[in-house]
Structures are given as C-alpha cells and as structure tokens.
Amino acid sequence: MTFQGAKKIFLAFILLITLLAGLYCGSAAVFAPKAAEKKARLSLEILGLDAAFLPEPQSKWAHIVYNDIKLDKDEISTIKAIDISYNPFSILFTGRLNTLKFTNLNLIGEWDPQAQMPVSFSGWAIPNNFQRIAAIPAQDIRMEKSKISILTPGLGGLSLDFDFNGELSDKKLEFQSHLNSAQKYISFTAGASGILAHDFSNIDVEIDEGKFEMPEAHIRASRGHGWFNYTRDKSGSSKIMAELRAGGLTVLEMPWQNASATLEIKDGSIKAFSEAKSIGVEGIELGLNYQKDAAAAGIIYGSLHADNGTALSDFLSEQSKITLPAADMTIIRNTQDLKADFAYEPGKIKYRLNTMQNAPVKEVIIK
C-alpha cells in the first residue's frame, strides 16, 4: 500500500471517528436531559413527593433545574428549586444522576389524632418504608434550608428545620443531617447520621440542647440533652431507643432537677421511664413513667418517695395544681420513708399512700 493510500485510509478513519463522536454528543445533548428529567421524577416518587405539578425544567449541558415547584394544587407545600447535575454520557447507560439538590423544601401537614392516618401532608405521602430512599438513582442527595411543619390541635404549629447530605452507593444511603426546632412547646438542636439500605436501617441522633412541654399533662423539661437510635431490620421490625437528661423538670408546678429518662418504642408500643430529685426541699425522689401499647391509649403513672414526710408535705404545699385532703396531708407529714403511687388521667390524679397494707386508692382534681 502506498503512502497516499494509507493516508486516505487514516483520514477516513479520523473522519468516521469524528462523525461518530458528533453523533454521540448530539444524541447525548438531545436524550440526556430527558433521561435526567425521568430520573428526577422517579427520585421524587421514591421520596413520596408529588411530581405531577413539576414545571418544565431549565436545561443546560449536564444540568437541569426546576424552579418554584408546587407540590399540591393548593400550593401549600413548595420547593424553591431542585438542581440536578448529571453526566450526559453515563446517564444514558447507568441511569444515575450525579447530584439531586433541594433548596427550601417546605412541607406542611396536619395532625389529627382521630383520623385513620393521624399525620398527613399536602403534596407528600410519607413513605411506608424509608429504606426505599436507598434506591434513588443518584450519587448524592442534598437538602438545604428545608422545613417540615405540622399543625396540631393541642400544641399549635410544630416545625423542624434541617439540612441533609447523603451519599448513595451499593444500594445504601449514608447521610448526615443538622436539625433545629424552635417553638413554644418544643425546641432543640441536634445532629443526625445513619445508614438506610434496602434490608437494614440505623439512624443516630445526638441532641445538644432542648426543652419540651406537655401542657395537658402539666410537664415541662428544660436544658435537655441525650441521644436517640432508630433501627429497622430486614423483617420490617423497627425499634427506637433513647436516653435523655434534663437539668430542670417541672411536674404539676413542682420543680425537679437532674432528671433522666429512657425511652423504647418498638412495633407501635412505647415505654418511657424517668426519675428526678426535688429542688428547694431536699430528699424527695420522683419516678415518672409513660406506657402505650399498640392498640391502647397511653398512660402516665409514677411514684413519690421521701425519707422525711414533713419534707414531702412542705414540697406539695408549694404548688397549687392539686390539693390533697387535710387528713392525707397529716398522714404524709407524720410518716417516715413514705411512698405515694399515682396515675394521671385527664383532669385528675389517682393516688395511694403506702402507709398501710391495702391502702385505698383516692383521686384529686387538677386545677
């Protein structure tokens, strides 16, 4: 073969490569944005967000952006922007996005304890299985300046501000998040991290500082810190464990300190046990518990213990929510190593003094 012949073949080969590259780049430019849009809609579906109201995206090379998204017809839940980056070439073969970024996600819902589904959101169907998030076709998920708000009949509006950064690989999501809530009845700052996979989940939450109040139960805690752990195994069984401490605790206007509590929530059942020591009047110990079975209403019960009955009498006299009969106050004042068991019911407390065997159960109205 002559030099000229070889040269023509080489040039033809280069021309063919250039043509194929051009066709491939052209195809990527045409089809990649549509593929990215399809994967974005799938990602929203997995997250439980309604993609029916998505506007047309703004498309750039390796980039699409949705702006001013309404997640429901009433425009209650919204997202300022969904920013999606992708590789125009690999998305056609792997079907994966690079980054899925949400800015100002704002979900608003209601809590109705009488409804079949007590918590519901506009534009967001809470996933039955958060482990599905590991199936989102993206390498990274980010949520910035996001908020979840719930309107409740008893506590008013509750809101949670959060940022979220997650990496997806091998069908699992590893994430970190910062949480913040500040309102009248509950406030805290916390950090969260964990793993969500198709057959396993583990989430850890560290509470830096917080306060909590249940007005209907006359309970208020402040200067709180502690941790939560959530696990879910491949059988679908889930469990939440927690340990919490509060520098200050008020129950029925009675002040306590050095309060600690443990919490266990498993398959719909809740158990919480706490203890605290009195402030002002020394030597009184409080044990306060909450228990709820999956199909039953929750109950609050506990006990008071005092080595010196006079101290307990003085302590009870400093509050005005409950007034015990004068005869019982006399028994308390004149008894050493006294224990009083009690159970809370809406508007009243049932109690029993262990000053004699088979002591009767009495009740007192909460003012």
Image (tube, helix red, strand yellow):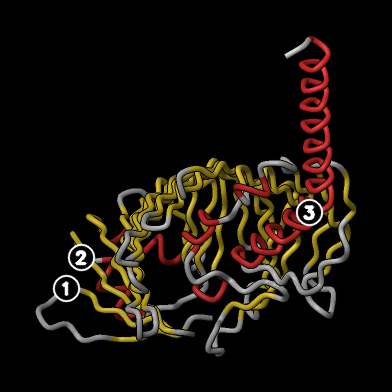
**Coordinates of residue 240 in the picture (x, y in percent):** 38, 59
Residue 16: x %, y % from top left: 79, 33
Pick the residue in front: 313 or 185: 185
**Residue under pointer 2:** 335
Q: Does the rendering let one see residue 312?
A: no
For the point 72% across and 76% down, which residue is it? 122
Mark 3–mark 2 distance (CA, rounded to whole Å): 84 Å
What is the number of the mark on residue 31?
Answer: 3
Answer whether labels 3 and 1 touch (C-beta < 8 Å): no
- Tell me if label 1 and label 2 are in contact, CB under 8 Å: yes
Asked which secondary structure carries label 2, the reply is: loop
Q: Is residue 149 above or below residue 280?
A: below
Q: Nearer the viewer, residue 335 or 211?
A: 211
Instruction: Classify 10 Å Cα crowding around label 3: few (below 14), some (14-19), many (20 and above).
Output: some
- For the C terminus, the quadrant is bottom right
Amino acid at dot 3: Phe
The quarter of the displayed image where residue 124 is located: bottom right
Residue placed furthest toward the front: 1
Q: Nearer the viewer, mark 1 or mark 2?
A: 1
Cα distance, mark 1 to mark 2? 8 Å
Amino acid type of the residue that numbered disc 1 sits on in the rendered structure: Thr
Q: Which numbered disc flags the more N-terminal residue, 3 or 2?
A: 3
Residue at horizontal 34 percent and vertical 71 percent from the top: 267
Regarding residue 92, the answer to whether it shows in the image is: yes
Identify the residue at horizontal 71%, vertical 72% (top origin): 50
User: Of 59 and 282, which appears nearest the observer?
Assistant: 59
